[in-house]
Image (tube, rainbow, N blue to C red):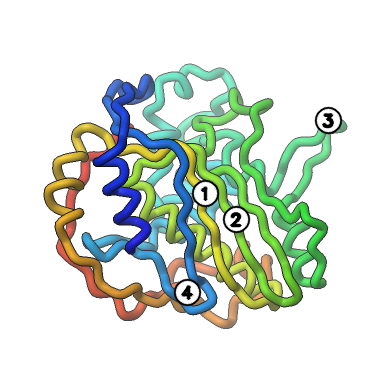
């Protein structure tokens, strides 16, 4: 929580006002931030200075790992974050590549599981790194990337958190995740949960020990209509100790993640928090 609150305070103190073309709103913005998560000691980075939720974030992560490309698939596992992007984005609604209601196109997990090759085949990035890490192999390229500029026109949204690099030292597994853009009051807590859970989950199914997850952010911003609540309410609250994440030990393979795993296989204990803050969401 200390590093999270320090970033929030830094934006308040040092941020520069920038107008965002997509939303038409002004954002108080800083460039470059680094957050580190102690996965080894299970210090789950769920924000405590407001009531926060983790299951939708984990559900979205599961959808990415499965390569989902439809908002209905995400809704079915408990995640509603793709409804608007799939069905309300004007440019996507007019895009001839859209296949109909709820279609998201070739975004996020599609790229991670079915990156298109020039010869017509596909690359399953996730399968490759899981197979390697399970065998104790690290070729310095155990990378899961969702960022494919050549196919931006085939999807409803460019990825924000776009690349995850795994590093294996003996049996110790590390993760470095890169994010190009972050709505700090709303999105960051969601993204923190995903980075932490991704390392813990991949370590579990590959038989390795999770160590540290490093979260690298570029454009960190607070929308103008979020600023009063962040500055005058959340930043005045004292944080509580981190809760702990528990993953069903029966999850032992990528096939398990693809078939039967649900958000109910992830539970949190020791979560003490302040009251909720209803930050406005900018579509």
Q: Which mark is residue 216?
A: 1
Relative side of 242 to 115, left or right? left
* Label 4, residues with CA under 10 Å away: few <14, some 14-19, many ≥20: few
> Does 154 appear above or below 60?
above
With respect to residue 136, does 151 lie above or below? above
Contact, mark 2 vs mark 3 (Cβ under 8 Å): no
Q: Which residue is mark 3?
A: 118
Q: Secondary structure at mark 3?
A: loop
Q: Counting residues from the N terminus, which is met first, the one under dot 4 or under dot 2?
A: 2
* Label 1 vs label 3, nearer the camera: 1
Neighbours of disc 1 within 10 Å: few (<14), some (14-19), many (20+): some
In the figure, is residue 36 to the left or right of 90?
right
Q: How far apart, in angstroms, are the residues tagged by discs 4 and 2?
A: 24 Å
Please tell me which of labels 1 and 3 falls first in the chain: 3
Separation of disc 1 and disc 3 at Cα?
31 Å
Q: Which of marks 3 and 2 precedes in the sequence?
A: 3
Residue at the (78%, 45%) spot, across then down = 123
Q: Tell me the crowding category of disc 3: few under 14, some 14 to 19, or many 20 or more residues within 10 angstroms, Cα based.
A: few
**Residue 102 marker:** none
């Amino acid at each position: 929580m200390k590093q999270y609150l320090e970033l929030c305070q830094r934006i308040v103190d040092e941020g520069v006002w920038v107008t965002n073309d997509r939303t038409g709103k002004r954002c108080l913005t800083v460039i470059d931030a680094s957050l580190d998560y102690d996965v080894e000691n299970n210090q789950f980075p769920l924000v405590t200075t407001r009531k926060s939720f983790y299951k939708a974030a984990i559900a979205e992560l599961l959808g990415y790992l499965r390569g989902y490309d439809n908002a209905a698939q995400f809704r079915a596992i408990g995640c509603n974050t793709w409804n608007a992007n799939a069905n309300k984005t004007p440019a996507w609604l007019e895009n001839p590549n859209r296949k109909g209601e709820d279609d998201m196109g070739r975004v996020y997990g599609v790229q991670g599981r079915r990156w298109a090759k020039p010869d017509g085949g596909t690359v399953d990035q996730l399968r490759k790194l899981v197979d390697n890490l399970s065998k104790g192999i690290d070729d310095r390229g155990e990378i899961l990337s969702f960022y494919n500029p050549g196919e931006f026109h085939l999807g409803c949204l460019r990825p924000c958190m776009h690349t995850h690099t795994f590093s294996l030292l003996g049996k110790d597994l590390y993760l470095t995740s890169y994010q190009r853009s972050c709505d700090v009051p709303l999105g960051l807590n969601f993204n923190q949960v995903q980075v932490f859970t991704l390392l813990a989950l991949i370590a579990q199914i590959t038989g390795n020990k999770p160590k540290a997850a490093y979260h690298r952010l570029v454009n960190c911003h607070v929308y103008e209509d979020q600023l009063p609540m962040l500055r005058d309410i959340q930043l005045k609250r004292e944080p509580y100790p981190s809760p702990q994440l528990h993953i069903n030990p029966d999850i032992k393979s990528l096939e398990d993640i693809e078939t039967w795993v649900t958000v109910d296989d992830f539970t949190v204990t020791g979560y003490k928090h302040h009251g909720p803050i209803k930050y406005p969401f900018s579509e």
